[in-house]
C-alpha cells in the first residue's frame, strides 16, 4: 500500500486555495507536483524506501488520473446531497460557534480534537510536537467520510482540518425517504420528518433538503400541528425534532417487516 492508514502523503492533501473553483483546479495542481516532492512525501508516509513500482517520474499525474476516475464514478453522481450536507454542517457549526464559542464548535469535531483556549487547538492525541501557525490561514472542511485528516501547505501558510459531517448530515441512515411515508405525508413533509431524528434548525433543513425556506417553514407548521415534531429554543435558534409519534411513524415505514 502506498498510503498508510495513519498518514497520507502531503502532496495528496494540500488544502484548496481560494481561487479553486472546481475539482479540475485541485487535480491539475496535484498532477503538477514535482517528482522529488512526490517521492519524498511517499517515503515519509511509508516510513521507508519507496517501492520500485511507485518510483515513476509521472507518479503524481497518475494519482491525479486515479482520483479523477474515482470522482467521476463515485462522487460526482451524488454530489448534490453531499453539497447540501456540507452546507448544513457549516450552518450547525456556525450556530455552535455563535452560541457557545470555539470550544463548543470545535470539541468533538473529530476524535481527539478540542479547543484548549488562548489560541491553542489540539488536533489529535498523537505525540507530535506542537506547531505554531500564527498568522497562517486555517480552514475547516467537512467531508462525507467516517474519518478526518489534516492538511498543510507551509509555503502558502495555509492549513486545513478535514472532519466528518455530524450525524444524519452526512447521509440519512435510512437512505432515501420511505416511499410509503412519502405517499402518506407528501414527499416534502416525509423528507423533513426523516431528517429530524436529531434536532435541526429551519436553516439546516433548508440546506440539507434543498427546499426553500418558505416551503420548509410551512411544512414544519403542519408537522407541528400533527404533533409529529416539536421544537425548542437553543440560544438564538429554534430547533425542531421528532416526537415519539414521529419516531414511531418513520420507524414503521422504514422497516415495514419488523
Image (cartoon, rainbow, N blue to C red):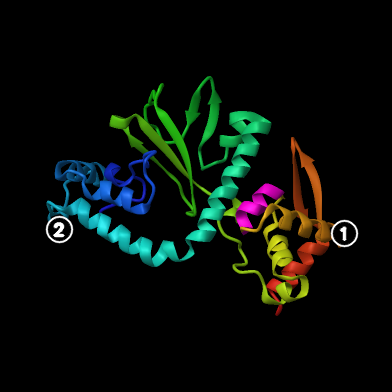
**Mark 2, other Cα within 10 Å: few <14 / some 14–19 / many ≥20:** few
* Quadrant (top left/top right/bottom left/bottom right) for the N terminus: bottom left
Q: Which of 57 and 129 is in front in this view?
A: 57
* Residue at point 76%, 51% (across, down): 240
Which of the two marks, 2 or 1, is nearer to us in this view? 1
**How many numbered discs?**
2
Q: Which range is magenta?
A: 202-209
Residue at (16%, 46%) from the top-left corner? 49
Q: Which element carries disc 1, helix, strand or loop?
A: helix
Image quadrant of residue 43?
top left
Is the residue 65 above or below the residue 60 in the image?
A: below
Circle on res. 53 = 2
Instruction: Tell me whether the residue at label 2 lies in contact with that at label 1, contact meaning CB atoms closer than 8 angstroms.
Output: no
Residue 110 at x, y = what percent? 51, 42
Q: Which of marks 2 and 1 is nearer the N terminus?
A: 2
- Find residue 229 and report its image quarter: bottom right
Label 1 sits on residue: 225
| Residue drawn where x is 48% and y is 31% of the image | 122
Q: Residues within 10 Å of mark 1 (few under 14, many from 20)?
A: few
Q: Looking at this rendering, what residue extends furthest in the top direction?
A: 118
Residue 15, position as x, y percentages in the image = 37, 41
Q: Does the magenta stretch include residue 250?
A: no
- Residue 152 in view: yes
In the image, residue 64 sits, relative to residue 33, either above or below, namely: below
The C terminus appears in which quarter of the rendering?
bottom right
Q: Can residue 201 be seen in this view?
A: no
Q: Is mark 2 on a helix, strand or loop?
A: helix
Amino acid at each position: 500500500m502506498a498510503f498508510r492508514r495513519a498518514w497520507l502523503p502531503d502532496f495528496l492533501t494540500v488544502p484548496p486555495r481560494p481561487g479553486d473553483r472546481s475539482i479540475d483546479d485541485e487535480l491539475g495542481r496535484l498532477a503538477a507536483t514535482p517528482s522529488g516532492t512526490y517521492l519524498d512525501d511517499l517515503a515519509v508516509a511509508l516510513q521507508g524506501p519507496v517501492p520500485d513500482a511507485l518510483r515513476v517520474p509521472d507518479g503524481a499525474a497518475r494519482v491525479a488520473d486515479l482520483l479523477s476516475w474515482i470522482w467521476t464514478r463515485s462522487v460526482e453522481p451524488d454530489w448534490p446531497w453531499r453539497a447540501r450536507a456540507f452546507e448544513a454542517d457549516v450552518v450547525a457549526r456556525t450556530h455552535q460557534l455563535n452560541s457557545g464559542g470555539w470550544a463548543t464548535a470545535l470539541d468533538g469535531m473529530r476524535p481527539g480534537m478540542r479547543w484548549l483556549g488562548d489560541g491553542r487547538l489540539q488536533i489529535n492525541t498523537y505525540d507530535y510536537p506542537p506547531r505554531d501557525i500564527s498568522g497562517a490561514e486555517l480552514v475547516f472542511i467537512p467531508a462525507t467520510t467516517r474519518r478526518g485528516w489534516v492538511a498543510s501547505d507551509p509555503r502558502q501558510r495555509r492549513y486545513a482540518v478535514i472532519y466528518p459531517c455530524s450525524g444524519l448530515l452526512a447521509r440519512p441512515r435510512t437512505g432515501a425517504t420511505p416511499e410509503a411515508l412519502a405517499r402518506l405525508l407528501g414527499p416534502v413533509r416525509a423528507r423533513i420528518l426523516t431528517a429530524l431524528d436529531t434536532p435541526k434548525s429551519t436553516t439546516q433543513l433548508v440546506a440539507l433538503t434543498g427546499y426553500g425556506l418558505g416551503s420548509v417553514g410551512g411544512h414544519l407548521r403542519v408537522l407541528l400541528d400533527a404533533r409529529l415534531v416539536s421544537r425548542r429554543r437553543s440560544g438564538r435558534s429554534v430547533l425542531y425534532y421528532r416526537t415519539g409519534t414521529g419516531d414511531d411513524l418513520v420507524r414503521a415505514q422504514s422497516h415495514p417487516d419488523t
